[in-house]
Image: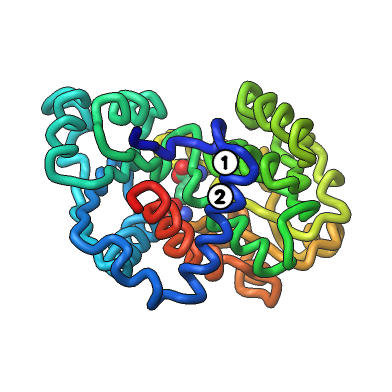
């Protein structure tokens, strides 16, 4: 039975911890895994732009001895030229896995149903699991453990937040989400994370008040306008500016470290002083995308 990675919703804590440990090992001992994907080909379907995801999958697969084929949306949405069902069936005859960055999570579900090979979510409107795995690897390396790590996500409740919540709940972290009113996380996802946290020893909370970040180890932020969201910066800036991650916010929270999945918008959701400061983990996160994804590929194709 092939396995997909569309979100962490169906993962067990042990399974997720296993991915994290493998990612660490692939990072530390690349030679051991340099033929792990020998003879395998992976196709990347991108409906949205990407720097980190596209390059880290391509380079990462190459480091495992495999081959990556990049396909953009060819000026159209996936499923427009031919159905997702036909696309998945055809791709499965040549490729050993499908990596897809799409608008709707439903697209991934349909693609996974139509494919006999694993489908990996490289970001959709609801989730960004590859990012979350890289982020918890970064937190583990920085703090020594993810269990009880106190992480405050500040900004727009989005795909990155959802995956951070779900993975954090499974790994036993304390994830606090702080958003402006009207920009909350999806409440179904939050309740799912709350249930997982209660079951597995994690903790999730949400507020509109920055004070919830007090005492955290890490402040995490992301763009105020996700790809495809369509809002205008001028319209939302007044609502979001009190949530900007700047030196004052860092000092008040007491957090030593800052994270951002990037692309970052300097002087909008994060200031350069913080982004380039000594507590910045942004480039470690970016590097760890590759190691995390390689662990996912080895697990699903291995
Ligand atoms: N963090 C992230 O997914 O970056 P890209 O959009 O550049 O791939
Ligand atoms: N929330 C952002 C993440 C980009 C990596 C977006 O969806 O655009």
Give ligand 1's quarter of the image: bottom left
201 up-or-down from 131: above or below: above
Which residue in the protein does label 1 denote?
Answer: 163
30 up-or-down from 192: above or below: below
Question: Tag on residue 194?
Answer: none
Colour convention:
rainbow
The span from disc 2 to disc 1 (Cα, nearest Å) is 6 Å
Judged left or right of residue 297, residue 93 is left
Where residue 302 appears, as percent x and y from the top left, is 35, 53
**Residue 123 in which image quadrant:** top left
Where residue 183 appears, as percent x and y from the top left, is 63, 31
Q: Secondary structure at mark 2?
A: helix
Q: Residues within 10 Å of mark 2 (few under 14, many from 20)?
A: many
Circles 2 and 1, Cβ within 8 Å, touching? The answer is: yes
Q: For residue 156, say whether it is visible.
A: no
Where residue 27 appears, as percent x and y from the top left, is 48, 71
Q: Secondary structure at mark 1?
A: helix
**Residue 114 in which image quadrant:** top left
| Residue beneath the point at 63% across and 31% down | 185
| Residue beneath the point at 55% across and 66% down | 24
Q: For residue 114, say whether it is visible.
A: yes
- Badge count: 2
Which residue in the protein does label 2 denote?
Answer: 132
| Residue beneath the point at 76% across and 42% down | 176
């Amino acid at each position: 039975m092939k396995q997909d990675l569309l979100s962490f919703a169906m993962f067990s804590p042990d399974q997720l911890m296993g991915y994290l440990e493998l990612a660490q090992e692939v990072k530390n001992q690349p030679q051991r895994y340099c033929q792990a994907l020998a003879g395998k080909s992976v196709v990347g379907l991108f409906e949205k732009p990407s720097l980190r995801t596209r390059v880290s999958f391509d380079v990462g697969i190459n480091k495992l001895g495999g081959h990556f084929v990049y396909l953009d949306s060819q000026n159209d949405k996936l499923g427009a030229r031919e159905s997702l069902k036909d696309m998945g069936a055809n791709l499965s005859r040549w490729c050993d896995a499908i990596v897809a960055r799409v608008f709707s999570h439903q697209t991934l579900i349909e693609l996974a149903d139509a494919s006999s090979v694993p489908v990996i979510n490289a970001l959709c409107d609801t989730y960004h699991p590859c990012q979350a795995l890289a982020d918890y690897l970064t937190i583990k390396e920085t703090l020594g453990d993810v269990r009880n790590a106190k992480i405050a996500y500040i900004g727009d409740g989005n795909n990155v937040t959802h995956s951070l919540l779900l993975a954090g709940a499974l790994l036993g972290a304390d994830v606090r989400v702080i958003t402006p009113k009207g920009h909350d996380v999806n409440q179904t996802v939050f309740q799912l994370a709350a249930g997982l946290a209660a079951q597995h020893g994690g903790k999730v909370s949400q507020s509109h008040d920055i004070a919830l970040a007090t005492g955290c180890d890490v402040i995490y932020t992301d763009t105020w306008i996700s790809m495809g969201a369509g809002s205008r910066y001028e319209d939302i800036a007044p609502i979001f500016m009190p949530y900007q991650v700047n030196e004052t916010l860092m000092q008040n929270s007491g957090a030593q470290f800052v994270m951002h999945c990037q692309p970052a918008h300097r002087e909008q959701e994060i200031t350069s002083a913080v982004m380039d400061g000594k507590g910045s983990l942004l480039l470690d996160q970016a590097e760890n995308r590759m190691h995390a994804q390689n662990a996912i590929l080895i697990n699903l194709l291995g």
